Amino acid sequence: MLGTVEVWRGDDRLDVGTPRNREVLARLLLSPGRVLPIARLIDDLWEGCPPPQALSSLRTFICRLRRVVEPPAQEAGRPSVLITEPLGYVLRVDEAALDSARFEQLLQQARGAADPSTVLGLVDEALGLWRGPAYAEFTHALWAKGEVARLQELQLGAVERRLDTLLTLGRHGEAVPELEAHTRAHPLREEGWRLLALGLYRSSRQGDALAALRDARGYLAEELGVDPGPELRKLEAGILSQTADLDLPPAPAPVAIRRPVARLRCLGRDDLLATAGAAMADAESGSGSSMVFDGEPGVGRTQLLRGVEALADMRGFQVAWAQAHPLEREYDYGVARQVFEPILYSMPESERHELLRGTVQPAADIVWHNRPSSGGPDGLHALYRLAVRLAERAPLLIAIDDLQWCDPGSLRWLAYLARRIEGVPLVVAATRATGVPAGDDQLLESLCSLFAPVCLGGLPAEAAAALAAELFGAEPEPAFLASCLHETGGNTFLLAEHLKAQATGKRSTSIARWAAGQLRHAGPGAATLARAVATLDHAADFHTVADLAGLADSQAASALSALVGMGILRDGSPLRFTQPVVRQAVLDGVPASVPRFALTSIVTPEPPGSPVRSGVPGPVGG
């Protein structure tokens, strides 16, 4: 549990009630799926001094909670979530719906990952579930103290794992300031001091590294009366002797910097792959070009870009891949750094130094030393020259997924590059989700006007039949396939997930999560408006929908424009969903008919007008 107790059904945060109601729910969630005896529950809630009416009070709390947590369609008198057993109560909830369980699952995946970039992504996602101290609402409760200590230790370990991984990736400039703050906050954790000293040493600050170790020795002696442990003593000796073991391990040879993971063939998109192949042939002759794969969310943009990546690799291109993300839109030149950093890291230091000399030097500050403020005209030109120098070594493909979430600095660099690419053996291939609001729509449109547009629509019937045959191992019945195409509009993601659901006879939770994610991306009011359209169906004219959603006409019009632009709703009256499966997912809620229990660490309420948190991430990109 990562803070106050919150219960979510789809996009709606439900009102649990009084603090005592939330405490009862929190205590039950400590043991999901297991019977909690009444006597134990009373003892925990009143800490061994229950009042005479404790049992009746507890039953009142349980009754109130049932009104919140049970599905709306649940038959009265037959609870399926909060159940009374002969000896107590049991809360039947999927642990995967708990933020605390998700946090531990991500850390477990990080422990099993070998690639540092993968580890960093998993740990960042895990730490993103925290917004404050564990069990902030119940720090007074004796029953919570053990779990608070356990989760806090896991969090601190995750923070240190993240900082260790940054050092492994050579990102000392990012890690050292965070390590300085971490050691000030937790001066008795020797691992923090070890990482700080190592980061300072690798930043050519040997004196500061030794000073940090002296500070650690002083804290430990003053607070605990002990000397530093063997790891700190070993590190200090290594720094004094400048042992090579403390340097970054040598980078692998720059062969196949990034191996593509996608199949070369993309169902129903072979003609678009051929277009990309023609652009690569021109680049091999010294004439570069840029293209953008434009399509509604879910049509398969990312899959097609992976196919382009695989084709480029087969032709001997260097491949530089970047994935834009809405959470990193404020990180200036973040996408440019994703493009260049893996290539630079794979080079021997002498070769990298030679590549970054002269007019390219300002680019080194941006993508290698992590000083985005070094941008401006000189930075744009330096990044352009860096791309040219790399392309002169071997033809280069720069692949960027989800351009709509690209940071402004990288957008300006791509525009600068696209206007000067004609004589360079370089192909820029990007994807953009049609209609998804961008951070700077005007800047994005200006960039895309410089790219050759390649539009993606729904899968044709032949490709859909091939997809179904791959999933089922046999040709589908024509009527069944036609029904699936009607339900999904031929949207690649929706069709694949709908086919899988049909095979199991269950509704697709993947479609439900995807729909929730797209409604979040559509902006404020979109989820509420979509629910109103789904509810009204044939009676969904604009003003009735706006009234039901409780939105002013201007707010409803803005949300409707986004939903139509993204292909979720059709334009016209009555308003209708483009894909019936999405309407069903919206009606069902996310996940379908099951309350969303999210134990987050949000201590303060959401500010007015902020997007509603669904707690269920959706896929990003096509």
Image (spheres, rainbow, N blue to C red):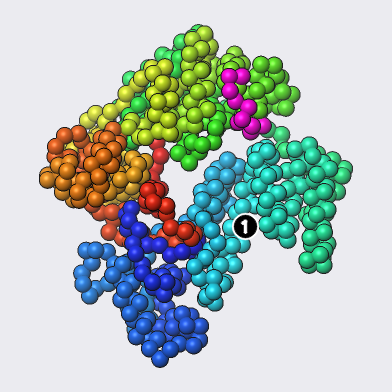
| 511 up-or-down from 270: above or below | below
Q: Residues within 10 Å of mark 1 (few under 14, many from 20)?
A: some
Where residue 400 sits: x, y (%)? 47, 28
Q: Residue 553 placed where, x, y %?
A: 23, 41
Q: Which of the two residues, 415 or 197, is positioned nearer the viewer here?
A: 415
Q: Quadrant of the C terminus?
A: top left
- Residue that appears at 71% across and 55% down: 184
Asked if residue 604 lies left or right of residue 274, the reply is right
Residue sitting at x 63%, y 56%: 157
Report the magenta residues as a range: 368-378
Residue 504 visible within the image: no
In the rendered view, does 407 fall on the left or right side of 586?
right
Q: How many marks?
A: 1
Q: Is residue 372 magenta?
A: yes
Task: Left or right? Give the position of 271 relative to 137.
Answer: left
The residue drawn where x is 58% and y is 66% is 150
Q: Position of residue 429 (x, y in %)?
A: 44, 23
- Name the secondary structure under disc 1: helix
Residue type pointed to by label 1? Leu
Quadrant housing residue 568 = top left
Residue 384 forms part of the magenta stretch: no
Residue farthest bottom in this picture: 52
* Residue holding disc 1: 156
Q: Position of residue 466 (x, y in %)?
A: 28, 33
Which residue is situated farthest in the left direction here?
539
Name which residue lies at 30% across and 45% down: 525
Above or below — where is 213 with respect to 553?
below
Residue 542 in view of the camera: yes
In front of the other: 521 or 479: 521
Residue 153 falls left or right of residue 213: left
